[in-house]
Image (tube, rainbow, N blue to C red):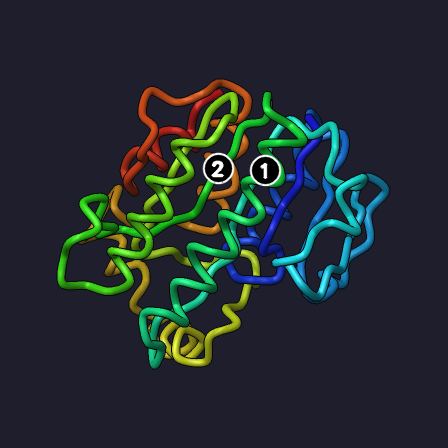
């Protein structure tokens, strides 16, 4: 498989990149982001693109991929809707429309969030914007689109969030993770399970377009 990965420097993206590098059937992985991932591997190309709203200069490097794993996202904390929508809906769709035009047989896997509102009319701003993004992605010409809606994700191989509040949560909450896992069961994911599920969605497909946390865990165990 030839994979292009957006958001590889975030916590989820770090875990997904790890699984891609470890997977024997991933022959080539290209990361695209504003900053370098800081890793070296024979099958990894790390493409730094400071402006993801302008992909014209790198379109020749976005051809012939089997799948896009889109892990790029920001916290809505402290943002008004217009700003959050630009960094969530506008940016995602700019990338997705470009890839759809260049790779119409590609599979697109998008990390959304638990509680996303596909009606686009709910009270929660972030959920409306995520819902609008999901709806628009489903209308693009791809071989398939899978929308992952994780809730709690535990970093298990040293992955770190870029959001300070999330880093504090994981630092102070680490001792409670086993207890939390006991109570929430299949609703809790790891960075490893998310990465494995994304790759399995590309390998085998999935029964659903929208995958909640328990669906992601089931897909991660598929062989």
- Secondary element at image label 1: strand
Residue at x 37%, y 49% (from the top left corner): 112
In the image, residue 96 sits, relative to residue 86, either above or below, namely above
Direction from residue 59 to residue 73 in the image, left or right: left
Determine whether, in the image, residue 45 is placed left or right of residue 184: right
Q: Residue at horizontal 67%, vertical 57%?
A: 54
Residue 84: x and y in percent read 39, 68
Residue contact at pointers 1 and 2, CB within 8 angstroms: yes
Image x and y of residue 191, in percent: 48, 51
Q: Position of residue 83 (x, y in %)?
A: 41, 72
Give left or right: position of 152 versus 222.
Answer: left
Q: Which residue is mark 2?
A: 109
Which picture quadrant has residue 43? Answer: top right
Which disc, if any, is residue 53? none
Q: Nearer the viewer, residue 215 or 121?
A: 121
Q: Quadrant of the N terminus?
A: top right
Give the labeled residue for mark 1: 68
Q: Nearer the viewer, residue 48 or 81?
A: 81
Residue 151 is drawn in which quadrant?
Answer: bottom left
**x 73%, y 39%: residue:** 62
Tell me residue 180's x, y (percent).
24, 59
Q: How many marks?
A: 2
Q: Earlier in the sequence, mark 1 or mark 2?
A: 1
The crowding category of the residue bearing disc 2, from other C-alpha atoms within 10 Å (few below 14, some 14 to 19, many at least 20), is: many
Query: Marks 1 and 2, how far apart in space?
Result: 6 Å
Q: Which residue is drawn at the image coordinates 50% and 26% (left, top)?
A: 141
Callout 1 environment at 10 Å: few (<14), some (14 to 19), or many (20+)? many
Q: Please tell me whether residue 162 is drawn above or below residue 44 in the rendered image.
A: below
């Amino acid at each position: 498989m030839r994979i292009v990965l957006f958001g590889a420097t975030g916590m989820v993206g770090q875990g997904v990149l790890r699984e891609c590098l470890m997977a024997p059937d991933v022959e080539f992985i290209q990361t695209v982001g504003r900053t370098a991932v800081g890793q070296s591997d024979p099958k990894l190309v790390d493409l730094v693109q400071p402006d993801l709203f302008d992909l014209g200069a790198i379109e020749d490097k976005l051809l012939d991929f089997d799948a896009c794993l889109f892990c790029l996202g920001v916290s809505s904390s402290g943002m008004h809707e217009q700003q959050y929508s630009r960094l969530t809906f506008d940016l995602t769709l700019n990338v997705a429309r470009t890839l759809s035009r260049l790779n119409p047989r590609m599979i697109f896997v998008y990390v959304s969030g638990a509680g996303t509102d596909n009606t686009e009319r709910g009270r929660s701003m972030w959920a409306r914007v995520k819902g609008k993004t999901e709806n628009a992605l489903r209308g693009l010409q791809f071989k398939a689109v899978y929308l992952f809606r994780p809730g709690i994700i535990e970093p298990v191989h040293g992955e770190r969030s870029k959001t300070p509040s999330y880093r504090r949560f994981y630092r102070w909450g680490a001792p409670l993770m086993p207890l939390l896992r006991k109570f929430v069961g299949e609703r809790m994911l790891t960075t490893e399970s998310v990465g494995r599920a994304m790759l399995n969605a590309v390998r085998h497909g999935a029964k659903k377009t929208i995958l909640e946390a328990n669906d992601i865990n089931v897909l991660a165990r598929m062989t």
